[in-house]
Image: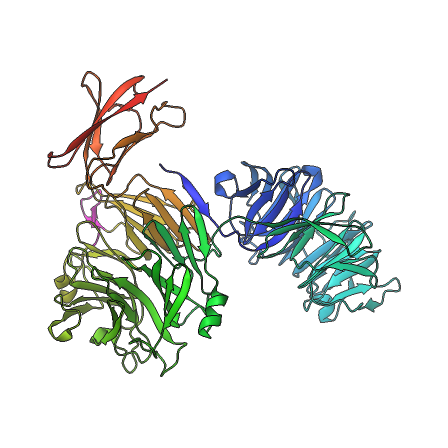
Amino acid sequence: MGAWKTYRAYYQATLVTETPNLVFGVYDGSLLSYSPDDGEIRTYSYQNGLHDTDIQQMAYVPSANALVLVYSNANIDIFLGDNNVYNLASFKNNSFPDKTVYNLEVIGDYAYLSTAFGIVVIDAKRKEIKDLYDLGATVRSVCQNGDYLYAATTSGIKKALMTTNLLDKGNWTLIYGGTDAYNSATQLLFFNNQLTFVSPWGHIFYIDQDGALQWPGITDVRYIKVLNGQFVVLTSTNTCFYSDFTTYTSVPLAAYSIDCNNSKNQYWLASGTDGLTGFTKSSGSSDYNVTASEIKVNSPKRNLNAYMTFTANKLIVTGGGKGANRLGNPGTLMVYENGQWYNFNEDSISQKTGLPCLDLMTATVDPADPMHYYVCSWGEGLYEFKNNEFVNLFSYNNSSLQSSVQENNRFVRVDGAVFDKNNNLYVVNGDGIVTNGLSIFLNQQKWKSFYYQPLASSSGADSNPDKILISRANPNLKWFNFYRGTNAGIMVLDDNGTIDDASDDQYAYSGSFTDQQGYGINAKIYLAMAEDQNGIIWVGTDNGPVYFTSMDQVNKGVCNRIISADQYDAGYRPMEGIKITSIVVDGGNRKWMGTAGSGVFVMDQSNPSQIQIDNFTTDNSFILSNNINSLAINDQTGEVFIGTDKGLCSYRSEAIAGKPDYSNVYAYPNPVKPGSGSSQVVITGLMQNSTVKITDLTGNLIQEGVSMGGQYVWNCTDRTGTFVKAGIYLVFAATTEGNKGVATKIMVIK
């Protein structure tokens, strides 16, 4: 209970560096290590000491035996090993308006950061920032030759004597500049005592002994480095080794970064989607031998998570996006099941449809077949998948879905789909000229669309329906949220149980609401919906959560809000002003609410007289970011998956879905040793909201409470908070009515 996990993408390797014992790679901004000796692969995150996410630069400082990691937000870590990491946050927190770091180079005992304002020098041994040189221009790369430090800046290549005061801009001399080739160099180094650099269009230039600019004809350059006395050039197709600017050998291995810190000519490449690659090569020969390949871990394909759902023991994650228009995110569909990720190939889907596969949104699983699901797209319609294979694309020409632009298969905007209990698929469709905003795939055999005025776009007012929710308490009721625009609000449709006949349908719609005290909620955006175990519909807005107990409330434009009493017994709204982006309900009927900028709130209403609201943020937890895109819960384990703008993480909560009976009740860990780091005992397999009593063998009551859904957690203390003595303790659990019960035992050891 209470454990955090990180599920960051480790799909594309872009950085590599070798240390005496390990090879480190950065994949999609995350750190991984590989041991050439035994093949062990380890990943690193908040859980083992890192202080941020999204690594952009990495370098090894031999004299300090440390990795310097620079994150996209300019945060810096000095990595000495697992859970041995020092954070240098002062640069991230300083007042420079632009702290972009373009390069990281190790010169002697120091690491040099090329930044948007100048140079930052890090002393890895002392674990501190040694100097900041404000050069009044963007620096993209630095290098050293003799007693001089060179900097490729946007105002030309400059040098300064390292024994002078480098804080003084007057000590920096412009040596080359005046053309784009000089002013925009992306990498700078010395090879054969000649200043060499890469132009922004990927060409190599160098300054010869006479001071003249030379172009040796080397193009398509991704990265350059001097290793083992050779000038190494990475291109999109090859790794080339130059003994001078005209004589070279190459191997057909493409990469983004290369390193070699030994004398055995053992090289390591960051090979994109192929992970890390190791190979050996003799100097002056094109012969090579791959010693390690495809070093990577099973992971999500991307750190995108616009929507998540947990169904049939599998997590489905999509990575699309929309606003007033689509975001154009690649078609990201990822499935997590039994500890493994399966990532769909959007390029393969595009080849079959003849259309780009972009902005995949809501996913819904066929209740009759857990390997059959439909995925909405904000532009191409509705995708169908079965057994992890693309099956069909439903658009305006083969379904009742409509295009927001006349007969254009790139503007079939769909983001809400859900099955009813009779295997009918409801799909919400909107924007542009769409008139029939609800389509139903009747028994997945026949398409039919329906007209309801709030779901129909009209002149000057697009309809922007988002999601659809079918009430479990009353399946005749279908709830819709409109996420933006002039019709932002809530609609409820009552089809009277005749889904194929619209003549007896009724609906309620409102774009504005007042709460139970008569105050307007003043919401402009309605983003999320969820139904709790009492049949109450919760809606996330840009001004906090609201909830509805009936269709009639929507018809009257009224709603409920969480209102608590302050010290003066006056009502206040604890989540007012917070933008709610997602809502899910756990087995204990708690509401988990993701927000834009405020982390995750957990609201427990089990005690009506004292509503408890907890808040997970980056300041008090291992959550990756306070910007939450989506949430999903595994009701069997209590694991809450949290999709953030920095990737996916999860929290193991104490609530699971209640069981139908007491046939499989047990406690774990059992036996337990209090105070040893394992003081929590979980009694699981309980029926919903069971009354739990823990006694000693003589019948003395030690602790009591109510299960959180199907689970109860005991911290091995009595009612005074004191750890209990060693011995056997009895657990009695019963339903609220007391007509069913169960007993089990827990052994406490010292």
State the predominant SS element of the stretch in magenta. Answer: loop
Q: Is residue 496 above or below residue 292?
A: below
Q: Is residue 39 above or below residue 186?
A: above
484 and 670: which one is in front? 670
Q: How many labels, in total? A: 0
Which x, y percent locates residue 122?
Answer: 65, 45
Q: Position of residue 278 (x, y in %)?
A: 67, 49
Is residue 318 something that shows in the picture?
Answer: yes
Which residue is more in the foreground, 451 or 53?
451
Does residue 65 appear left or right of residue 159 in this picture?
left
At a point 29% along the width and 46% down the height, the residue shown is 635
Residue 284 image-quadrant placement? bottom right
At a point 43% along the width and 43% down the height, the residue shown is 5
**What is the basis of the colouring in this image?**
rainbow
Instruction: Identify the residue at image location x=55%, y=45%.
Output: 89
Which quadrant of the figure contains the N terminus? top left
| In the image, residue 402 above or below residue 624 | below
Expressed as whole percent of the image width and height from the top left, the position of residue 507 reads 16, 69
Residue range (magenta): 561-572
Percent position of residue 229, x then y: 81, 51
Q: Is residue 378 left or right of residue 236?
A: left
Verify whether residue 501 appears in magenta.
no
Can see residue 324?
no
